[in-house]
Amino acid sequence: MDIIKFLDGFTTEKLTARMSSRRGALAAFGVFGTQALMAAAPCFRTASGKEALKQSNGAAVNALQLALILEYLEAEFYIKALDSGVLPNGRPEAVYMQISKHETAHVEFLKAGLEGAGVEPVFKPEFDYTADGAFAPFDTSNPDAYLQLLTLAQAFEDTGVRAYKGQAGNLQGTPFLMPALRIHSVEARHAAEVRRLRAGFLDISLDEDALPWITLDNRGPGMPPITQPVYDGEEEVVQGGVNLVELTEFGAVEVSQSYDEPLATQEVLQIIAPFLGCKE
């Protein structure tokens, strides 16, 4: 498999070429104040260092700030994973290298978009990838370190997929909707490829036990309970007010596999809370 082609999406080169034009287009957002989203998360602050964050109705900017927080989380994770010495050489390292390039590019793209709209991007917070001692993914003396790298990668990517879908409505009518949906697609490809790595490591059948997409609210084999909030709600079979199990010949399993359910802002913040280094 050509990993580069499989994970094709927003490469650094593609994003850089678009940043200058996006800066001008995003002026249509107007200049929003600091965001209500950040007021709900004391670990996050704008570049101005303000402690009291002003409430605003800038739903689009809130969505971009939330996306930036997630991309910060993912980008630093993959950099640390590549530097840890835990990843096996060959395909695992190649996959993580390519995903790392994407996540770093997403960070720069979102920061440029926010700045182009006259908004200060939130600073990157401190992250605790041990989740207060639950994991040791970068410790070469930990026999489960590689599995934990795969576990966290899957959880982060699945969160990103659902979070971008949850914010799509807030980006409706803005120049950022289509780029966000493309990033959503790239995150889904990341998640699928990480599942393939996990299936290979656990020596399980990808077709039977570890499909490259979410099924019902199952977190998948080898995924610890701390990751369950990532998958809660994915068992939904009603789309657009229509129960697709009743309407079609497909069962709940097949219907749930066909759709990713959106995550609301507060749900995303609750999922990533264990990985925040600041505990205010």
Image: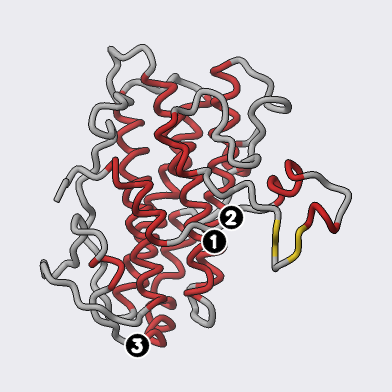
Quadrant location of the N terminus?
A: top right
Work out how far the residue at label 2 is from the one at label 3, CA to CA, in angstroms: 30 Å
> Which scheme is used to colour this image of the protein?
secondary structure
Q: Which residue is at a point 35% across and 50% down the rendered structure image?
A: 270
Label 2 or label 3, whichever comes before in sequence order: 3
Amino acid type at image mark 2:
Glu
The image shows residue 209 at horizontal and vertical percentages of 67, 25
The total number of labels drawn is 3
> Would you name the residue on which mark 1 appears?
165
User: Which of the two marks, 3 or 1, is nearer to us in this view?
Assistant: 1
> Would you name the residue on which mark 2 appears?
261
Quarter of the rendering containing residue 109: bottom left
Work out how far the residue at label 3 is from the one at label 1, CA to CA, in angstroms: 23 Å
Work out how far the residue at label 2 is from the one at label 1, CA to CA, in angstroms: 7 Å
Category of crowding for the residue at label 1, using alpha-carbon neighbours closer than 10 angstroms: few (below 14), some (14–19), many (at least 20)? some
Evaluate if marks 2 and 1 touch, with contact meaning CB atoms under 8 Å apart. yes
Q: Which residue is at a point 24% across and 43% down the rendered structure image?
A: 127
The image shows residue 97 at horizontal and vertical percentages of 43, 37
> Would you name the residue on which mark 3 appears?
30
Amino acid type at image mark 3:
Gly
- Does residue 169 lie above or below 236 as drawn? below
Label 3 or label 1, whichever comes before in sequence order: 3
Q: Secondary structure at mark 2?
A: loop
The image shows residue 178 at horizontal and vertical percentages of 56, 70
Task: Pick the residue in front: 90 or 169.
Answer: 169
